[in-house]
Amino acid sequence: MIMKFMNKRRIVIYGGLILLLAVVTGSLYEIESDQFAILAKDYFETVIDRKVEIGRATVNLLGRVTLKDVKVYNPPGYSSNIFLHADKVYLTMGMTGGETSGFRPRNIIVEKPEVFYERPDTRPWNTEDFWKAKTARHDHPTFIMPIEIRNATIHYSDSRVGKSGISLTLKKANISLTVTSDGSEIRNVLVANGVPAVGFGSFDFLMKSHPNARQSEITIQFHEADPRPLKPFYEFIGFLNINSGKIDGRYRLNFDQDTILHTADLRVLDAEIEHTITKTKFSGVSPRFTLESIARDTVTEVRNLKIFWKNTIISGNGSFSNRTSKARFTNMNFMTKDGKAEDISFLLCDPSFSASGPVTGSCSIFSDRNLEKYRVEIDLTKTKTLYGNFLEKDPYLKSLLKIDGTVGQKPSSIDIEIENSKGILQPFNHGWALLLTELRGEDAERIFTFIRNRSIFSLKGSLTGKAEISKNEVDGSLDLLNAELIYPDYFNKPKNDRANLDFRIKIIDSALEFENLNLRLASSLISGSGRWSEKSCDISLAIPKIKWKDAKKFIPILKEDPSSRFHFDGEASGTFKVVSSGGNEGAEIIANLDLDGTSLDFAGVGTKRIGQNSSLRIHGKTGSSAFTIQDGELGILNTKLSLNGEFGNAAYRISLSNPSTGLDGLKTILASRLWSLLNAIDAEGQGGIEIDIESRNEEMKVNAELDAGRAILSYGDTWYKPIGESFKLRTQLTSEADGIHVERFELNQGNSTLICQGSIGAGRNAPITVDVRANLDVRQFKERAPGLERIKIEGRNAAQALELISDKEHRAAITGRLSGTLEEPKFSLIMERLASRVIANSIGGQIRALGSIISSPLRLGKEIIEGVIGTDSDRAEKGE
């Protein structure tokens, strides 16, 4: 019994092993079946209504069918004729229970397929017919088929997204879905988790479709995915580009026939965002986007867009045409109510511009002649605003901007309104062209960095102009007619005086660097370059022409006091340099002027007339109350005098000197006022000159010395002074409003001396009262003045008359008085001073004739002699 039992047990075990082996080997052993391939092809074509190709089919004993080289085709009109291509598709067959019990696929596994999703310009998605409800394709019982797709490569192409469409390839996607077996509805729940995104990161994909219920939905959950491939979805914003970062969040699409509802809540982590116009980059930012929009075939409507950018929320709505629309248009509106200027200042498309503080604004993007234009309005009143080193606006100074331009480009114009000032900015190369329609002085003082908060500079009224502005450079012109500019001690331009300024400046560290400056003041022109700041300056001016009437009006240091005894007029040219290091040291001034076109009037002394060659060089320094000339030179004709002095309020002091200089300039000035006869005197050689002039209020004092011992002086053949002979002139006089008071005038030639004291009234034909005392070396005087021999009256000449009154030392003392006027001077001999009355009567005529020769400023040479000689009887009749 035991043996029989053991044999039976052995048979059972062997039989089980044989059965197990048969099952195992049967599952491995596949039988190729063309019939199965045909059945599968017909079935799938019935369900999906697409052309299907199956290379071959195999089946094993466990009911597993393997389809190889499976292709599902697209309808005509798509770039790829293949929708799906899989190397292998596994169908696990088995019996199902219930009313629909039968031998059918329990699940389907698609291994490593390539799937091509596509929406071209003029056709719907190549999967659209999958999601639509259909009538049953056969009368077999309906059941649900689970499908699993492993390691799929998905090619996604949508030409209607963005400006140029989008194309992505997703690899190693694992998808699960279910399909109804009768083909009436491909109802599915497609799930793919952890799909590698293009670039980096991953996403979860959930698609639900129930066509009979008209419901389809796709949800994409991004997990730190690369945002760059998704650019076509957001490029309608127009001015931002995501260079790097990690996108995280949810994007959902709800399909309803011809519309797609988009909702999104996405954040880009640790992103680099680039402003496409200025190329400004923001690193390490994490903006958030929420979106609700409806996409139709030709139009996308944005209902609720919010951009959370730093501490600012920008909301948006509107619509725009899709790429395939025949009528292209955009109508988008963005706005912020409680934004931060520091967050959105880059929207002004210039990296030199920055602002901080609360801001409100709006932006409209619209279509105009097939171009997308934008219009931005920003209220910067509450902000602190900066533009390079050029502009600085404090909060609560009313500021409005209106910006117009083309999307993707720098603004075409920006209307600016700051308080009561207005202007228009337009792009120019790498900066802006500014048209100032009106700039109020008080506004300029508050916003321009180089003058704001500087008490030393004042700008009132208004001005207009234009300029080209880059980050720290300004090149432009201003009309200053209606402006009042005050820069104490240096410049004062009253309102309504014509003035224009052309300039090219750089603003570096709150300082102005002038590369090119041209200032037109009425009829004058000044050019300049240099550097100026509140603490220091170094400015060089070239003066092609300056009218002194303009200079005296605009430059305080040159303004004449009405009581001044020194006047100048006409025009000048030259160079002018101002150097200041700040503090209390004042400014160093260096001037080199050509004064040929200038008239200089030393009141009561003489005048340098226009056209006479002259120049002025000054090296001086300004102080708290005066301008000091440390070194200088005044040249008039061949007279060159070193110059120093001091100019203060209603007072000045000037010293002129040269131990060896030509004398024509001095002679010309003196001849113009005091003694015209000097014009006829020829001077050769050098002389020493020292002149001190001091003026206070209405009084000017002059002390002058002339040493012409090394000069040759001659007056035709009437008088001469040889070289080496002593010739010195000393004068002390005071010029006041009523004329000149000659305190002492002393002339020494050789051994002869002439001393004068008296006064000369004001005006050209001024009255003269001057006492004259002469102590002459008669022999020497006769030799130096041979013209005396030609003055003959009743048989006796003037030389003989001098001999008659000379003493045994051959010296003659003469006392007289100059009277009359400068136009008609008279010389009267004081007879009682002569030793002999008889001699006095005898030579009186000759002495008076000599006095007329000396005093006459109008009649020269022979004509003088002939005009003044008369007879005793002639003079007796006149009571002389």
Image: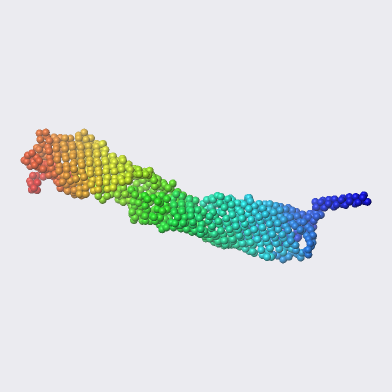
Q: Is residue 785 left or right of residue 358?
A: left
Q: How is the image coloured?
A: rainbow
Number of marks in the rendered image: 0
Residue found at the far front of this picture: 2
Q: Is residue 607 visible?
A: no
Q: Residue at x 41, y 58 (%)?
A: 420
x, y percent for residue 657: 26, 39
x, y percent for residue 167: 63, 54
Q: Is residue 296 left or right of residue 22?
A: left
x, y percent for residue 742: 19, 44
Q: Which image quadrant is residue 849 in?
A: top left
Q: Residue at x 71, y 55 (%)?
A: 149
Front-lying residue, 481 or 851? 481
Picture layout, residue 871 above or below residue 163 = above
Front-lying residue, 617 or 880? 617
Picture layout, residue 738 above or below residue 683 = below
Q: Which image quadrant is residue 41 in?
A: bottom right
Q: Is residue 245 visible?
A: yes
